[in-house]
Amino acid sequence: MANEHKLSIENQQKLNKLEQELSTARDTFLGYPVSKDFDYSELNKFFQYPINNLGDPFEQGTYRVQTHEMEREVIAFFAKLFRANPKDFWGYVTNGGSESNLYGLYIARELFPKAMVYYSESTHYSVRKNIHLLNIPSIVIKSQENGEMDYEDFENTVRMNRHKPVIVLATFGTTMKEAKDDIGKIKGILSNLAIQDHYIHCDAALAGSFGPFMEPRLPFDFMDGADSISISGHKFIGSPIPTGVLMAKRSNRDRIAKGISYIGSFDTTITGSRNGHSPLFLWYALKQLGVEGLQQRYLHSLEVAEYCEAELQKIGVNAWRNPNAITVVLPKTPKSIKDKWQLATEGNISHVICMPNVTKTQIDEFISDLKNCTEPIIEEDISYDFSLS
């Protein structure tokens, strides 16, 4: 069929132009948490197959053009990394952090239908949307200056509503400042208030993939008290297609599973048809990297982030980072700098995220542009935060 209907010259030119634009844009972004140092060309042959991971990855369905086996291996990798109970874990590969967060909140709501959701004002924008979709009552908790949840405000607010079960949406790596909510502190507060009916979902979209390697370590995983965890695959690991991983407890998943005869599997996921190529990309990357490879990626990013922070301070820019963070926060930059380097900006701050593909040479070029820029910052310039999820 492809040989019978060729594209017109005009449309072929559109494709060529798009490729050039994408290539240029890819090479000059520092403001978004997306890794671009991947090569999945060995998997090109799999694009001729209509891979659809229908249903639950741990159930054998009737549709066999799928990558469930690889998906299960990806889930097992993260179950071990996030210290899940080997006999009580489950998960699936999602379309990204928004879907993963939706699933965590969905399980929580089904377990505790009369619960109140608590999340900080620094939480990713998708969470508000998900809470609205699920129609759960919620309260926003103040953030500290560094973006982390204000635990005193959390404790006082929960105390006023302690007759209700508690759902906490904790963030391990906030959008703008890469702040990390401490699940140990959250658990301690719930324990002090004697609240037994609670559920903690950890949105670890960016930082979850390198959380286990931080020194000192910060509490965020299953052993620390999380009931479910979400990460993004296209961020720290890298993927040509936005993707995420949702990890949960199988015992909780079983409470909401429904058998569907049409596909010969349980309906346990948000979407029916699911991208079967994404698990393949993640499987391929994780088999190449392993735990040690992930750790090396983090150490490289950390080194570049430290360098970026120091170099900005050298030219008089008040740059700073949260502990263990690969995100460098700086005052809002002039529009020409923001546009060239595609810097996410919110209010009076911008940030540079030192993903594994970012080099010191790129940082030097960015610093040079900033140093030589004479353009004033226009306060009326409204910037929207289109954080990738």
Image: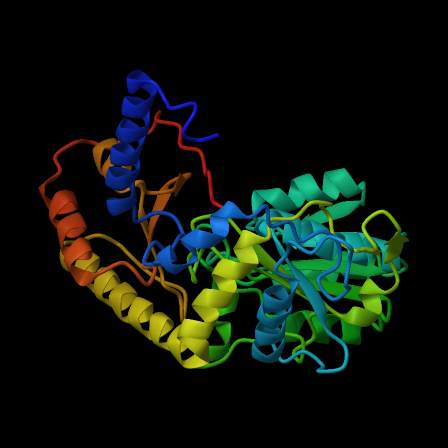
In terms of image quadrants, where is residue 359? bottom left
| Residue 389 appears in the rendering | no
Please count the marks in the image: 0
Q: Is residue 11 left or right of residue 291?
A: left
Residue at position x 16%, y 44% in the image: 370
Residue drawn at (66%, 42%) of the image: 128
Left or right of residue 20: residue 323: right
Q: How is the image coloured?
A: rainbow
- Image vertical order of residue 213 relative to residue 109, above or below: below
Q: Position of residue 172 (x, y in %)?
A: 55, 63
**x then y, percent, for residue 60:** 77, 63
Question: Residue 86: image x %, image y %?
Answer: 71, 82
Residue in the foreground of this view, choosing between 78 and 196: 78
Residue 217 horizontal/vertical position (percent): 50, 80
Q: Nearer the viewer, residue 220 or 107?
A: 107
- Judged left or right of residue 241, residue 297 is left
Inspect this view and state whether residue 388 appears.
yes
At 79% from the left and 55% from the top, the residue drawn is: 268
Q: Quadrant of residue 374?
A: top left
Query: In the image, what residue occupies the spot 58% across and 72% down?
Result: 78
Drawn side of residue 307 relative to residue 243, left or right: left
Of residues 11 and 7, the one drawn nearer to the viewer in this rendering? 7
Residue 90 vertical position relative to residue 223 in the rendered view, above or below: above
